[in-house]
Amino acid sequence: MNIKQLLDEENFLNIIRLVEKRRLSLFRTLSRNGISFPTKTKSELVSQLFESALYNYFQEKDINIERAGSDSLKPDILFTDTETPLEIKTTKGDYWIGGSYSKREGDFLLISWDDSGKQPNYFVSHVKLNKEDWASQGDNFYGTKFTKKDLSKKDTTTILMGELAERTAELS
């Protein structure tokens, strides 16, 4: 099975529900304890929640999968039967930032999220990227970036949730 088949509507909706359940629990617990984080840290936590949810969900479906955890040298997710890596990038804005390991070629799950309203909003897409797709942000910044505008130009994009023209879509 390829990633597009694995991330069909039924599977993806189950994964996003699991992510949102865990995100609400985690962020509420942190808030109740007076703990707050900057947006970048929250996005990293959301990325870890997606990684964990993908791993747990597909393990339960008997799909052979590995999770990188804290090992940045490995892809976030690896579907071992097909040796297909999946990188996960999250943002609360209109572009995704990556370091040198983001310049891997392959499958990416690009997630934009916003929890400022009553309901959380997500934009999620699956796309195949090449090293050249990641643009430099100049000499004074280590990271590369990939924008929503760049995403709209890729013919390998599958939108799993939300609209690219709009910022995000509500989770119902």
Image (tube, rainbow, N blue to C red):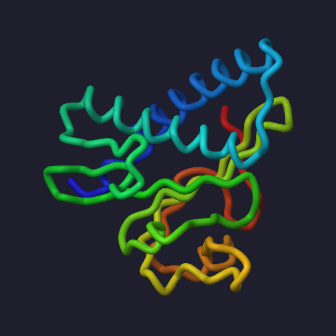
Q: Residue 151 placed where, x, y %?
A: 59, 74
| Image position of 143 (left or right of 18) | right
Q: Residue at x 26, y 43 (%)?
A: 66
User: What is the tally of numbered marks visible in this picture?
Assistant: 0
Residue 43 lies in quadrant: top right
| Image position of 157 (left or right of 83) | right
Q: Nearer the viewer, residue 32 or 57?
A: 32
Q: Residue at the left extreme?
A: 81
**Which image quarter holds the C terminus?**
top right
Q: Residue at the front extreme?
A: 140
Q: Nearer the viewer, residue 164 or 83?
A: 83
Residue 136 lies in quadrant: bottom right
Q: Residue at x 59, y 50 (%)?
A: 161
On the question of residue 4 being in view, the answer is no
| Image position of 71 (left or right of 49) | left
Q: Nearer the viewer, residue 117 or 43?
A: 43
Q: Residue 30 placed where, x, y %?
A: 73, 20
Q: Vertically, is 6 above or below 93?
A: above
On the question of residue 56 being in view, the answer is yes
Q: Residue 79 placed where, x, y %?
A: 24, 50
Q: Nearer the viewer, residue 49 or 112?
A: 49
| Image position of 22 (left or right of 101) | right
Q: Vertically, is 111 above or below 107?
A: above
